[in-house]
Amino acid sequence: MAPKFPEPQWFLALGRLMAARGELFRRIGYVETRFIVRVLPDQDGGNDDGGGEEQNTGVAMQGYALTDAAALAPGAAASFDADFTICARRAVWRRMLDEIARGGRPELRHTLNSLALIGDELWLESADQLREDKFYRFNQSLQELFNLAAELPAD
Amino acid sequence: MPTVPIKDEHRVGTEARYKVEPSAYLQKLFESGTPDLSWMKETGQWGMHAKPSGLGLRLKDIEIGSYGVVPERGGKHLSMAPRGSIVPDNVPSLGFTINNKDECWADNVTELYEEAVARQWSSARDIPWDELKPLPDDLERAMCQLCTFLTEVEFIAADAPTRWMSRINQDFFEVKLFLATQAMDEARHMDVFRKRALANGGGLGKASAYSELGLKKIFDAPSFSAQTGRLHLLGEGFVLTIFRQGEFIAPSRVDQEIFRRCMQDESRHVGYGTMHLRAQLKSRPELAEEIHTELDDAERILLEIFSEPESVEPMAVLMGGGIAHFDKGMEMQSQLWRRIVGEYLQRCDSAGLERRPRCLLPTDFAKLVS
């Protein structure tokens, strides 16, 4: 069965695609960051395939590779020592991934940066603005990583 | 070995102003044919084996042995002689005036330099210009005015720090290398926004006297650290948020790619400035007042820039999606103003500067008029 977002195996599959698209990521430049993808249950609980639970996946990117992805138990996020956490409800992530599946990238105002800028549907958490700024320093690589989801089987 | 031909060789040196006698060493070499080789024994620490990481051989990989020690005080010879080399007694001074590490250093500077080199891009090659489509007139005019502003202000972040770059002791070469990448980044920003303004049926709009005043104050800052406060902490932090907004309001993928790539570059500059001020304030806490004074004035000028229609309205038109939705655009702009101020204050926190009580920028956009 194909892994589902945000399972670690889903991100590791993206990592394999990233390795296969080596030239694209080398052209953009290397990355050194650790971040958490936080999926919050939908407010109405509808279509929530995560069992209504918050899910946290820690992702590490080093150089031109996704080097680690791990499910983080509730309350264990701090131990991952992430630069930033990207938080959104499941429906918002779902919409982004659906748009990526359709067009290879999200709609213009639904990119990671655009959503984080407005901050109501998707937002960043970090204890240090300098570490949060890595979201911007490596943004092109992060967006291209998520855009690779277009090549994963629909879950 | 064949002789390399040189055009008009017989004329070379016929009008030379100096006559140089061969040195005793050269005379001896040509007479005896025996090399001197004394330089082989005059070396810095020897036997180094710097190992490349998975990303190649980076600056941090050659921070080994004595070569990895960045001195608190730069060499008194004030020359370009490389740190760690044997420096002759008779090297001429270049008159560097920034000779203490804390005056220019940031702990992330080598990391940011390598990152900058690895993440360079080309406005000609990497922007999908052929996807540019005609926009409604109001959106194109707003985008062109925004591009005019950015073309106007971006290169100050090359011109101003490089004035100080030539005064930084060569023993802190890592800082110079980073500032060189910043200058290159700003060159690309100036060129890409000029290209965008001219690429889709518009052109350049109106320059701003208040922006020019702000640029002049950055240019004339009395010290490198004072300039860093104005430029990196407030100015570039503010522009970083504009780039983030630009990525959001982009009416096309062309504009989105431009703003996203510029955003990445600008984040590095802000990262250096914040960490430099942190190091500087830790070393010399009394400098905080000088930085505060610079920021008092810089914030005042920023508010004046935001008192002009050509600064406020283009972003609102782009945010709202056209003049017809100007109110919506202004509402979004006011929400984002809080983000600009919030992120600026957090960077001040990171730098170790308690700015909140003295900050002139209102947290609510509406207070700009009340």
Image: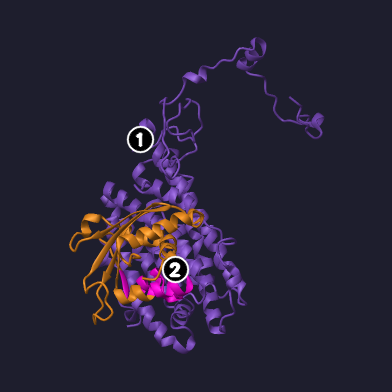
Chain colours: A orange, B purple
Tell which residue pokes out farthest to the left in this image: A75
Which residue does the numbered mark 1 point to in the structure image?
Answer: B69
Q: Residue furthest bottom?
A: B324
Most foreground residue, B196 or B232: B196
Q: Does B113 lie within the magenta span?
A: no
Residue kind at label 1, given as amino acid type = Val
Q: Pointer 2: residues within 10 angstroms few (<14), some, or many (20+)?
A: some
Quarter location, residue B102: top left
Q: Which residue is mark 2?
A: A150
Q: Residue at x 33, y 52 (%)?
A: B275
Q: Secondary structure at mark 2?
A: helix
Marks 2 and 1, Cα distance to the nearest angstrom? Answer: 47 Å
Is residue B6 positioned above or below A153 on the image? above
Q: Residue at x 55, y 79 (%)?
A: B140
User: Residue A154 versus residue B122: which sits nearer the camera?
Assistant: A154
| Quarter containing the C terminus of chain B | bottom left
Quarter of the image for residue A107 reads bottom left
Q: Which residues are magenta?
A: A96-123
Q: Is residue A100 visible?
A: yes
Q: Position of residue B17 (x, y in %)?
A: 72, 30
Q: Label 2 is found on which chain of the structure?
A: A
Question: Quick check: B13 above or below B268?
Answer: above
The N terminus of chain B lies in which quarter of the figure? top right
Disc 2 and disc 1 on one polypeptide chain: no
Residue B260 position within the rendered picture, expressed as x and y whole percent measured from the top left: 46, 66
Type of amino acid at the residue the image marks with label 2:
Ala
